[in-house]
Amino acid sequence: MTAISTMPADPTAEPAPSRTPRRRRRRVKIVLGATALTLVAAAGAGYLWLDATADVQNLGVSDCTALTPVVTATAAGTPTAEDHRAVCGTLRSLTDSWAKGDATAYGEHFTPDATYTSYVGTHYQGRRDITEGHRALFGGFLKDTKLADSFLGIRFYGPDTAVVTSRGDTYTGARKKPADLTKTQTYTLIRQADHQWRIAAFHNTQRQRVMERISFLYSPETKPEAEK
């Protein structure tokens, strides 16, 4: 018969650790992880929804001459239909120069003191600056690209000044023109002494689709009339 020990427990011995706190911590970690994954998935789905519903209504027209210009007469006179065609011709020639990767010809479409602000915020001052900047671009990451344009409007302020707004983007020759033009552009053109229309100022802005959509959702009053 086996004897049962009746010796008292060692009072100095530490008690065995309980598994309950560890299990509780494990459950908390699992819940927090699942919650984080759910939030990430929800944020991703929300972003995709915002991006998918951020289309614009005012797409413009591909032919600049198809626009109906807004004309403001001045003491200097009133622009003519020929002026309208000449302004559009300058922009068409500008696009052709880009497609050829010809920085010198591209720069000739700007006045000697023109300003050019790119969509990343780079500010070029003067024709030489614009030309040399694009020479580097045409030989670098914009090599063999073309320009796609969709014109939104043209306004004449007298016979010698025109403001043209458009949507635009770059694409490679192997691809079709992109349907979604991600940049909004403003050209200010003037007629110079040689009667040629040249660009005195150009400003390019990257359209932030999701941020624009959020702005319209939270503050519908910010939506342009053409987008309502």
Image: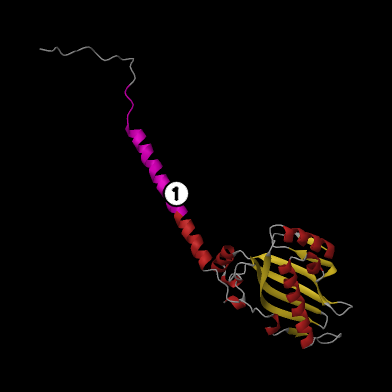
In the image: residue 210, left or right of residue 13: right
Camera-nearest residue between 91 and 120: 91
Q: Dominant secondary structure of the magenta stretch?
A: helix
In the image: residue 24, left or right of residue 115: left
> How many numbered callouts?
1
Residue positioned most to the right: 193
Say what secondary structure mark 1 lies in: helix
Q: Is residue 8 above or below residue 153?
A: above
Decide if residue 126 is in sight here: no
Quadrant for the N terminus, please: top left
User: What kind of colouring is applied to the model shown?
Assistant: secondary structure
Q: Position of residue 176 (x, y in %)?
A: 59, 70
Decide if residue 74 is in sight here: yes
Q: Position of residue 207 (x, y in %)?
A: 63, 65
Label 1 is placed on what type of residue?
Ala
Quadrant for the C terminus, please: bottom right
Splitting the image into 4 quarters, where does residue 227 fall?
bottom right
Q: Is residue 74 above or below residue 121?
A: below
Q: Position of residue 23 (x, y in %)?
A: 34, 36
Q: What residue sits 74% from the left and 79% below the top?
A: 88
Q: What residue sits 49% from the left and 64% below the top?
A: 49
Q: Is residue 46 above or below residue 224?
A: above
Splitting the image into 4 quarters, where does residue 42 fall?
bottom left
In the image, the segment drawn in magenta is 15-40
Q: Does residue 161 show up magenta in the picture? A: no
Q: Does residue 38 show up magenta in the picture? A: yes
Q: Position of residue 47 (x, y in %)?
A: 51, 60
Q: Which residue is mark 1?
A: 36
In the image: residue 31, left or right of residue 203: left
Splitting the image into 4 quarters, where does residue 110 fall?
bottom right
In the image: residue 18, left or right of residue 74: left
Question: Pointer 1: residues within 10 angstroms few (<14), some, or many (20+)?
Answer: few
